[in-house]
Image (cartoon, rainbow, N blue to C red):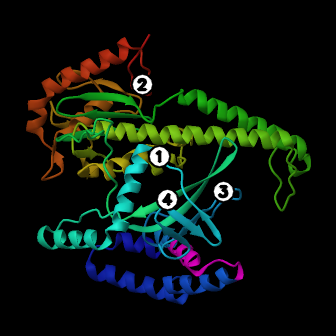
Amino acid sequence: MFKLKYKDADNKKALKNVCDQMKEMQKQYDVTWDYCRTSMIPIGKKYGIDAVFALTKAEDVFRGIEKCLYSDGETIHFKKRGDLPCIRAKQINRGIIMKQMNFKFKDIEFGVKIKDRYEQEEVDAILYYLKNTELMDSIAANTYKETDICVSTYRPCYVSLVCKKIRGKLRVYVHITIEGLSKPKLDRFGNVKHNKGKGVVGCDIGTQTIAYTTETKVGLKNLAERGSCIEANERKERQIYRAMDRSRRAMNPDNYNEDGTIKKGKKKWILSNRYKKLRTKHTELCRINATNRHLAIHEDVNELRSLGDVFVTEPKNAKKLQKKAKTGKHKKRFGRSIKNRCPGYFQSQAKRKFRIYVEVPNDYKASQYDHTSDEYVKKSLSQRMYKLSDGTMVQRDLYSSFLLYCIDLNTNKIDKNKCIHEFEKQYKNQNETIEYIQMNQIKVMNSGIRVN
């Protein structure tokens, strides 16, 4: 209730009143950081966990509570049974102790295997700081005093142990959190691997595709497309999951009603060896697909970063599109598409890597505006190709990205003069992009572009 009031409060006096009431309620029901911290200490002693690990976990718990109180969070999510832990202590000299790239966790001492040239460069930077601590700190402090610029010192802050199961084997990765930015990646000739361009990048992010317009290039492509086909991988996941469901039903017939639904209450589940093998296979397939999505999105963002440094897009709406519709016969929406393509993750990575990130206001309406008539025309979702008022045929996503490209950065509104001046050149680039897609028979999802 107070969360809604907090969002609706306009003036400062009403906002302060709501904040004071929320603070009083938090103290009344012990929903405070002090209570979370003090209550975690006896829990840590009960289970034999070091205090620094317990307090680090308390921070994670309270961060989830704050997301529910002040942000868009709805519930606190707990670790699922079978999930591997992430062991983290936010102090470099306690919990997981680091000494030159040798680590100590309780009575276990271990080193690391470095298999990547980029990892080796990061490790060398950390070791250089540990050898020249006073020098690096003084350089960083003097630079900040003189120029107000923060220098990356590569001081190790704390260490985390991340456990993953890959191809049936348990692997433990060491994550070192450092002070500053990571080192830029260089190729074998010593040149910067990912170039950084300058200019505006207008990007229309859909549930399955991205369309972008820059000064030199226009593109339309499927999101998170890498390696084998996403549709084929999703079909494999569904087949394995159905086989798991059949096996579980055959072994536990007493846990189901006559209509096939699961009975309520506490139940005992018997899992066959076949079910366990299928579950392992399904987990591995999901891991591979998730890794491919992660790498593909980073490749797409790096490509766009090479074309410009100002990223203009519409506000995030992936979470809203995942939810079922409240009215109508067909209530399912875009949950599967968003799970397979991850448009929200793409947007968050663009926000992290671009110098300037702009989300246009809701009244921008890039999908409805027609610059030839200076009017907003609402179109159905299925209408991917349409004509402007002067008869010019445009592709919906590409034209939306063009309108995002033609933004006035001072007012965050469409620059109509820029639309008129740039349209002829960008329209030619759009037609070349569509011809390239048709010539190479690339299937772009929900684009309206037909290929033989």
C-alpha span from label 1 to label 2: 20 Å
Question: Is residue 19 placed above or below 405 in the rendered structure?
Answer: below
Which mark is first along the chain, 1 or 4?
4
Which quarter of the picture shows residue 194? top left
Label 4 packing within 10 angstroms: few (<14), some (14-19), many (20+): few
Q: Are marks 3 and 2 in contact (CB under 8 Å)?
A: no
Which residue does the numbered mark 3 point to in the structure image?
Answer: 83
Residue 74 visible here: no
Element on which disc 3 rests: loop
Element on which disc 4 rests: strand
Q: Residue at the location (50% across, 88% down)? A: 27
Q: Which one is in front, 427 or 12?
A: 427
In the picture, measured across the screen, residue 369 lies left or right of residue 64, that is left
Q: Residue furthest right?
A: 254
C-alpha span from label 4 to label 1: 34 Å
For the C terminus, the image quarter is top left
Element on which disc 1 rests: helix
Q: Position of residue 297 (x, y in %)?
A: 42, 40
Which residue does the numbered mark 1 point to in the structure image?
Answer: 321
Which residue does the numbered mark 4 point to in the structure image?
Answer: 175
Task: Report the mark closest to the observer, 4 or 3.
Answer: 4
Q: Position of residue 263 (x, y in %)?
A: 83, 54
Which residue does the numbered mark 2 point to in the structure image?
Answer: 444
Give the amino acid type for the residue marked by disc 2 in the picture: Val
Task: Report the mark closest to the observer, 4 or 1.
Answer: 4
Q: Which residues make up the magenta segment?
A: 46-62
